[in-house]
Image (cartoon, rainbow, N blue to C red):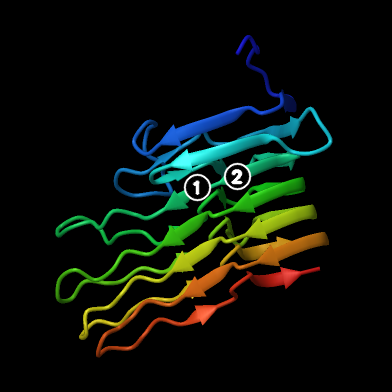
Amino acid sequence: TDCAAGSGADTLTLTLTTNFDATGGAFAGSSNLSGSQAYYPDITSDITINEASAVYNFVFSAVGNVRIFNVMATGDLSLEGVGILGSTVNPARNTFPDPPTEPARGGAIYLDDGTLSITDSTLSSNGATGSAVTVYGDVAQPGQGGAIYGTANSTITSLTNVNFLDNVVRGGNGDGLDPAEEAAGGAIYILGSIAVMNNVTLNRNIATGGSGDFAADGQARGGGIYAQTIT
């Protein structure tokens, strides 16, 4: 609040023991999500969010079907000393004649050709669950990037002293005739690049492919990280 709009870089410094809860449906629907999901405003410029102490105490905690950050092509998000807890995406199943449901991507952070760096932070218990087949001829959807998903032109410039704990992706189930879908990148799924990783902990992150019943099961790839380029 009390911050004039402008085109330059901005820094938001957070105080100790602050907690922010968001409830699904509390915000307008995202262009990257379907159904009743919610999200925070898109990041479209250089934004740094940091915590005032040496050890993170500020936690973005999500309740319901909520993604915390969408970082657009003009956005550059830096997180320093924060936690993101329980942010999930689970697109609601569209019904005919609506378009097919979109994949579940980026439980906490979606990089839509954007740029991200994270330092001294923890991303825990975030998730992305693809929707299941509900009627004959329907299509299951994948779950990709339990904590972070990045498109082909996105970049994670640095991950330093970051913990990824208990993040989960699940592929949508089939129905015995139509196949299930994949789960990939329990913590991170990125089609772009990760430039630097230094002292990164990945613990108990899981990718579980959907069950096809009598049809093909979905693959599970990269319980911790699925990445095309790590430089």
Q: Can residue 197 be seen in the rendering of this structure? A: no
Q: Secondary structure at mark 2?
A: strand
Front residue (pair 88, 33): 88
Quadrant position of the N terminus in the picture: top right
Q: Amino acid at mark 1?
A: Ser
Q: Amino acid at mark 2?
A: Ile
Above or below: residue 195 compared with residue 77:
below
Q: Secondary structure at mark 1?
A: loop
Q: How far across and down, in percent of the image, does residue 73 sit?
A: 61, 45
- Residue at 66% over, 28% down: 17
Front residue (pair 190, 23): 23
Asked whether the beta carbons under mark 1 and mark 2 sit within 8 Å of each other, the answer is yes
State the residue lying farthest toward the front.
17
| Residue carrying label 2 | 84
| Residue carrying label 1 | 87
Q: How far across and down, in percent of the image, does residue 225 sit?
A: 64, 69
- Residue at 41% over, 69% down: 142
Q: Count the labels in the image.
A: 2
**Residue 75 occupies quadrant:** top right
